[in-house]
Image (cartoon, grey):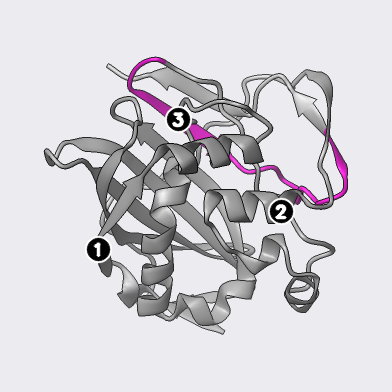
Amino acid sequence: MKISSAIVGREAGPDQQHVDKRWLMAYNAALGEVSDKPHPLFPVCYEWPATQALRKSTGLQEINARLVHAQHDLTLHRQLREEKLQVRGRVIACLQRKPGTLVVFRFEARDEKDEAVSTSHYGMLYRGVMLEGGERATAAVSDPPGAEKALEQIGEIRVAATAGHVYTECARIWNPIHTDPAYVRAAGLPSCRGAQRRCRRNSGPARANLRRLPWPILNGSTCSRMKSYVHYSTMP
C-alpha cells in the first residue's frame, strides 16, 4: 500500500460554508458547553467538506481506515461569527515517518470581503503506508511543540458511550471511526474513538498548536484532564 507524493499541490474549493448560530451552539453543546459564542476550534467543522473533497481527488479516501489524525495547527486571524465563508484546501506535504506516511493539508477560510478568517494545517498519518516518489512539500512543516515539563493532572473526564455520535451530528463531521464499531474493528483499532477537543478562548487573533493524545480517546471511557495539552499564544 503506497501514497504518491505527486498529490502535493492538489487543491479543493472554494467551498461556500454558511456559519449560523444553530451550528455554533450545537458544536458547543457537543463539547458540554451551553453558549452561542464561537468555539476557537469550530473551523474543523467548516473545513470538513474541503477535507473530504481533497481525500477523494487524491485517492486517499480509499485508504481512510489507515488514517490517524496526527496533528493540527490552527491560526485564527480574527474572532469567528455568524457569516458566509469560502474555504479552500491544498495538499502541501507528503513525508515519510516510521509508522507510515504523513500527509498535510492546508485550509484557508476567507469572508465575503475576502479577508482571512482562519488557516489550518491538518496532519494525517496513514499507518503502514509507504511513500512513493520521495518526500515533497510546498511549505515548511514542523511538529507542534511538546510540553516544557510533565503535565499536571487536575481531574478526570468521563467520555460517554454516545459522545462520538453527539459530536458527529453537532459538528456535521461524519467519520465512521468515531461511531461505527464494525468500521473500527476492520481498521484494527480497539474501539470507537472520541473526537472532542477543547481549547481555551481568546479575544483576539490567536494560534493553537494541538498535539493529539498518544493514545485513542475511547467512547465510554474515562480520561485524565491535564493542565494543558495546548500551546496557545496571541499572534501579533
Q: Are marks 2 and 3 in contact (CB under 8 Å)?
A: no
> What crowding class fits label 1: few (fewer than 14 Cα within 10 Å), some (14-19), or many (20 or more)?
some
Give me the residue at 54% from left, 76% from top. Answer: 130
Residue 175, percent from left and from top = 60, 64
Q: Is residue 127 visible?
A: no
Determine if the magenta segment contains residue 219. Answer: yes
The quarter of the rendered structure image containing the C terminus is: top left
215 above or below 150? below
**Residue type, numbered disc 1:** Gly
Q: Earlier in the sequence, mark 2 or mark 3?
A: 3
Per the model, the C-alpha gap separating discs 1 and 3 is: 23 Å
Give the extent of the magenta segment: 203-223
Residue 204 x %, y %: 34, 17
The image quadrant of residue 89 is bottom left
- Residue for badge 3: 38
**Quadrant in which the N terminus appears:** bottom right
For marks 1 and 3 on the same chain, the one whose residue lies earlier in the sequence? 1
> Where does label 2 land, which residue?
164
Helix, strand or loop for disc 2? helix
- Asked whether the viewer can see residue 124, the reply is yes
Give the quarter of the image for residue 74.
top left
28 or 197: which is nearer to us? 28
Say if the magenta span includes residue 233.
no
Q: Measure the alpha-carbon separation of dots 1 and 2.
A: 28 Å
Residue 13: give its label: 1
Residue type pointed to by label 3: Pro
Which is more toward the observer, 136 or 16?
16
